[in-house]
Image: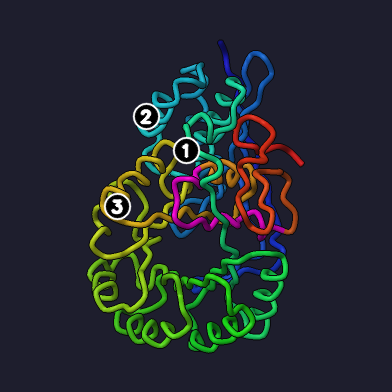
């Protein structure tokens, strides 16, 4: 057997400018990977790198030739463990680049077997859940309008970005138009530990599911300080990148927010899910602003999760790929009618 590989970079505009505490973006660069076997079957994956973690589309393009050489040398998409191990040995960092290849090879292997990815893993598609829909930072009126639009589209879970001097106003306004929505907020490291405790005390009145990454990731004791004093559950995102981070945050949070683009692949993220469970943590799977070329694979992990934040492709003006159906935000694995991850060119 032989495998042919290639990759392509694309810039995808967002539907609206997207602002978090660290800044604003209007488009996202993704690098799509293709792995083709002798019979013409093609596996698709993609990298949605984040500069916050030291990775860009340029760095992804720089390391992909070495990673794809690993795939071609192994030559068999069934040898997933070997491929991911050799990729880590070849390129130690650059997790988004490795994740793109991991997704593409899993997509190809499950297409060869004629089954969707969740079935390959033995998961029950009925045990799925809905994704949250993210409201980026803006003036309160605009955020309110976006929340109303999301609710009208059927989304019952909203994630609200914070890290401003008007966070309480933002949450109060959104809760007023989404009284029944499940609501959580994400500060993206914006607060000091004492600011976080004071702010969360005020926000607790708005019935939040949890508060995500209240303090900088380089302040683990600050995270513990907030966790021990918060009336609302705490989720760790930037503080939980790889498998070794799971036990390190286990006594500092309630929820581990995992991402393929942070950890480097599908096999690794499954290990992290099981490790988080072993440490008594709830699990959320999140994403960057990505296309369905990568989001589709993440959706197949929904039966293992407590929360899903897989709306990255929903924030795009136009996604060149279809993925797993999400009617009203519900990740509908049962209606997926094709093998693999479900990612196909639109």
Q: Nearer the viewer, residue 177 or 18?
A: 177
The answer to which quarter of the image holds residue 109 is top right
- The label shown at residue 85 is 2
Direction from residue 227 to residue 199 in the image, left or right: right
Give residue 146's position: percent from left, percent from top.
Answer: 68, 74
Of 53 and 124, the residue lying toward us: 124
Q: Is residue 85 above or below residue 10?
A: above
**Disc marking residue 131:** none
Q: Is residue 312 above or below residue 332?
A: below
Q: The residue tagged with tag 2: helix, strand or loop? A: helix
The residue under the point 62% across, 68% down is 18
Q: Helix, strand or loop at disc 3?
A: helix
Camera sees residue 31: no
- Number of marks in picture: 3
Single out the mark in the foreground, 2 or 3: 3
Q: Which residue is mark 3?
A: 246
Inspect the magenta stretch and tell me whether residue 148 lies in it.
no
Boundaries of the magenta span: 301-316
Are dots 2 and 3 in contact, CB under 8 Å?
Answer: no
Numbered disc 1: secondary structure: helix
| Tag 1 residue | 98
Q: Position of residue 176 (x, y in %)?
A: 60, 85
């Amino acid at each position: 057997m032989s495998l042919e590989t290639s990759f392509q970079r694309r810039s995808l505009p967002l539907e609206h400018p997207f602002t978090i505490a660290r800044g604003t973006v209007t488009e996202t660069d993704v690098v799509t990977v293709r792995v083709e076997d002798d019979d013409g079957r093609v596996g698709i994956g993609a990298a949605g790198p984040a500069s916050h973690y030291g990775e860009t589309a340029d760095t992804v393009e720089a390391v992909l030739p070495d990673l794809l050489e690993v795939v071609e040398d192994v030559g068999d998409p069934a040898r997933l463990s070997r491929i991911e191990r050799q990729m880590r040995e070849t390129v130690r960092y650059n997790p988004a680049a490795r994740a793109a290849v991991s997704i593409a090879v899993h997509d190809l292997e499950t297409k060869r077997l004629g089954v969707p990815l969740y079935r390959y893993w033995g998961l029950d598609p009925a045990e799925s859940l809905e994704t949250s829909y993210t409201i980026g930072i803006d003036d309160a009126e605009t955020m309110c309008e976006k929340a109303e639009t999301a609710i009208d589209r059927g989304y019952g879970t909203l994630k609200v970005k914070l890290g401003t001097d008007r966070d309480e106003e933002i949450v109060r306004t959104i809760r007023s138009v989404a009284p029944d929505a499940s609501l959580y907020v994400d500060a993206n490291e914006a607060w000091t530990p004492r600011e976080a405790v004071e702010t969360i005390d005020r926000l607790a009145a708005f019935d939040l599911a949890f508060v995500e990454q209240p303090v900088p990731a380089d302040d683990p004791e600050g995270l513990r300080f907030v966790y021990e004093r918060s009336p609302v559950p705490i989720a760790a995102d930037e503080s939980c990148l790889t498998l070794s981070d799971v036990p390190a945050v286990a006594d500092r949070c309630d929820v581990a927010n995992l991402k393929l683009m942070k950890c480097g692949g599908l096999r690794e993220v499954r290990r992290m899910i099981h490790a988080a469970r072993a440490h008594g943590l709830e699990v959320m799977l999140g994403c960057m602003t990505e296309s369905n070329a990568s989001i589709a694979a993440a959706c197949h992990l929904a039966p293992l999760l407590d929360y899903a934040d897989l709306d990255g492709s929903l924030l795009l003006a136009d996604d060149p790929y279809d993925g797993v159906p999400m009617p009203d935000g519900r990740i509908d694995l049962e209606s997926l009618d094709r093998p693999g991850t479900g990612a196909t060119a639109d």
